[in-house]
Image (spheres, grey):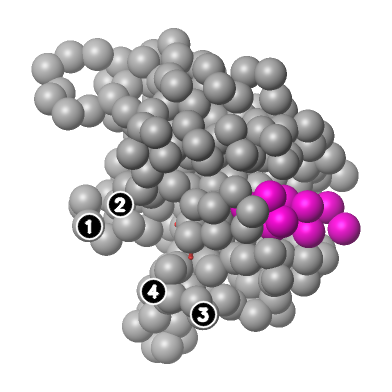
Amino acid sequence: MRKKIIAGNWKMYKTAPEALELVAALKKEIGGVTAVDVVVCPPFVHLGAVVDNCRASSIAVGAQNIYWEDAGAFTGEVSGPMLASVGVKYVIIGHSERRQFFGETNETVNKRTRAALKNGLKPIVCVGENLAERESGRTFDVIRDHVTGSLAGLTKEDMLRIVLAYEPVWAIGTGKTASAAQAQEVHKFIREILLKMFDKATADATRIQYGGSVKPENIAELVAQPDIDGALVGGASLKADSFAALVRNSMN
Ligand code: PEP
């Protein structure tokens, strides 16, 4: 039985006081939830403060990126040892916004994933097709390419600590959610790829989140699908009431 995981990607939102206000409200609302794993992923500058403020709760904290070297002359980058040292547990890797705007490729996603694992962090590895790719019937080719490229050379043991997130780019921040059936079709396909790359036990054990305009109103139908194990949430994670409702509705 895979435990569901709901992660909030705050993207480049929230000043320091706003981040603390959101986390205080989340702690009050869902700080004791253990039936699903709850993760919040603030911008780098707030990680230490959010970790400190989540201590007496079940909410874990994730980063939104990681560099693959541990230390060095890489101005502007943040490394695995740095993230681990402030108590971060997860890291989002290869989000479509990073693939689209910051030159992220399967190869760099793979390097970042290895760096996260080496430093005891749990990678949330994102894959997903854009609108042109879906409309030209290339969804499955793109997903195969993202999954095999991003996870190339990793072991079954590595996979025990990795979460995948299927995020169709056309559904991110657009209000257009993939239907539960559309999402399930791709999640099932991802599990078949994992079966070929690793084995049945690994494919069955890997958690695959859905992401793309997930809200309190549609989470229940999504997680009712056999291969959808939670959600990576952008917009609806920025307000305590909507994220808390979404977490609660994922448990029903
Ligand atoms: C995301 O940022 O990963 C995301 C899915 O955003 P939204 O929920 O706003 O579509």
Magenta stretch, residue numbers: 243-252
Quadrant location, the C terminus = bottom right
Q: Amino acid at mark 3?
A: Lys
Mark 2 highlights which residue?
Answer: 98
Asked if the beta carbon under badge 4 is closer than 8 A to the nearest atom of ligand 1, the reply is no
Mark 4 highlights which residue?
Answer: 130
Residue 138 appears in which quarter of the rendering?
A: bottom left
| Front label number (3 vs 2) | 3
Expressed as whole percent of the image width and height from the top left, the position of residue 70 reads 30, 16
Which label sits on residue 176?
3
- Mark toward the start of the polypeptide (3 vs 1): 1
Does residue 146 show up magenta in the picture? no
SS category of the residue bearing label 2: helix
In whole angstroms, how far apart are the C-alphas of marks 3 and 1?
A: 21 Å
Q: Amino acid at mark 2?
A: Arg
- The residue that appears at 32% across and 21% down in the rendered structure is 79
- Mark toward the start of the polypeptide (4 vs 1): 1
